[in-house]
Amino acid sequence: MATLILVAAGWYFRPWSEYSPAEIHAATKPEHLAETFRDMDDIFPYRVISAQENANPLPRDVRNDAVSFRFGGQERAVDEWQAASDSTGLLVMHDGVVVHETYLLGSTPETRHTSWSVGKSFVATLIAMAMQDGHIANLDQTAEMFAPQFAGTDYGATTLRHLLMMSAGMDFEEDYNAPGSDIRRLFLGANIYGQNIDELVGSVERDRPAGEDLHYVSANTHVLSAVIRGIYNAPLAEVVETKIWRPLGMTGDASWNQNIQGDNGMAIGYCCLNARLEDYARMGQFYLQDGVWDGERLLPEGWVTMATRPNAPFQEAGPASVYPHRGYGLHFWVPEDHDGEYFMAGVYGQYVWVDERRNIVIARTAADTAWTGRTAESIAAMRALSAHYGDPVIEAALETPPAGAETTETGDE
């Protein structure tokens, strides 16, 4: 018995390893989340995503106005919402210029905040880039055509479209709070046991036809990340670096967490990008500019519209939706009563919000343990920020060109 206890203690604390279950358990306690989410590289294995040397920061005209909004019949200040929801950073851009920027709970402009499921939208963007590069003919091709390790599985036979729409029909419980849920087993398998994530995901089975309902499943995105690895024959972090990070001129190095450290590690494809708040905002600006950066089209024409709107009736927001106050597109959320608005989102309150009508991008990070019940309030807060800082309509010619936009002598895009 004493030997078993010693073995278990050794496995739990792993004094020989840079990473241990004991450290992960301590770091994921609610009181430590704000610190944990800015130090993910100290807790989980990762691969670096390098920025360009001498990358230019976003232009700034920071005002940090006091903004309020009505919610639940009461007037609330955005600062109150930030404090109540353990916000760690908030950045607002209008016309490509940073107009509001705050950091809280120990964060700074250099902090690499973890994305959680905001990273899903980055993976979807790589699928679009692979289409632009000619590697993917259409979204009705199946995953196993690009990721042969899934051949013969239900996931292998699933189309890219249904993976992106979160309509793959998989028997998968996406509930981090439910003991024994599929997402908890996936998280523990990858982060604690260092298991092969493709094999874990490949065992998931379909329990209804694809294309019938919206069922948000993180494993879907991991399969898409495997498609990207297969197409470019490279680790996910390397593809992010070459296709997104450097072309968009991200200002800071980033990282992507993986199951084990080193070259044999596999990216946790459904989450876990770690980056500066400014660089999350730059990704939103890229979508606001319809996938064009520095005058070069990096996403297929029509992709942004298709990805950021519901593609089927079951993706629409409304009373029938199992996801209150929001609908879905292709790995982007769509708020209820949307008017050119959409957002990337992650657990604990991570957001990248885009308002096309007002030329607004908002990037926000947090460690909010009550994020699920705060969706409507967060949408109201971001809409208030958009209305305060944004123009009512997008002008034909901007006084200040968007970040990365190609300019001429007349200042037109």
Image (cartoon, rainbow, N blue to C red):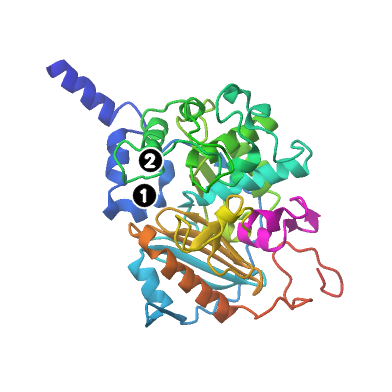
- Disc 2 target residue: 43
Q: Position of residue 223 (x, y in %)?
A: 56, 34
The answer, for residue 253, to whether it is visible in the render is no
Q: Earlier in the sequence, mark 1 or mark 2?
A: 1
Mark 1 and mark 2 residues within 8 Å of each other at the beta carbon: yes
Q: Tell me if residue 318 comes above or below residue 238 in the rendering.
A: below
- Where is residue 229 shown, x and y percent of the image? 63, 32
Disc 1 versus disc 2: distance between alpha carbons? Answer: 8 Å
Q: The disc labelled 1 sits on which kind of residue?
A: Thr
Residue 254: % across, % down: 54, 47
- Which amino acid does the dot numbered 2 rest on? Ile
Residue 379 appears in the picture as rendered: yes
Image quarter hosting the N terminus: top left
- Under tag 1, what secondary structure? helix
Asked if the magenta segment contains residue 306, the reply would be yes
Give the residue displayed 71% in from the left and 53% down from the top: 303
Q: Work out whether 389 lies above or below 91.
A: below
Q: Outermost residue toward the left?
A: 1
Q: Which residue is mark 1?
A: 36
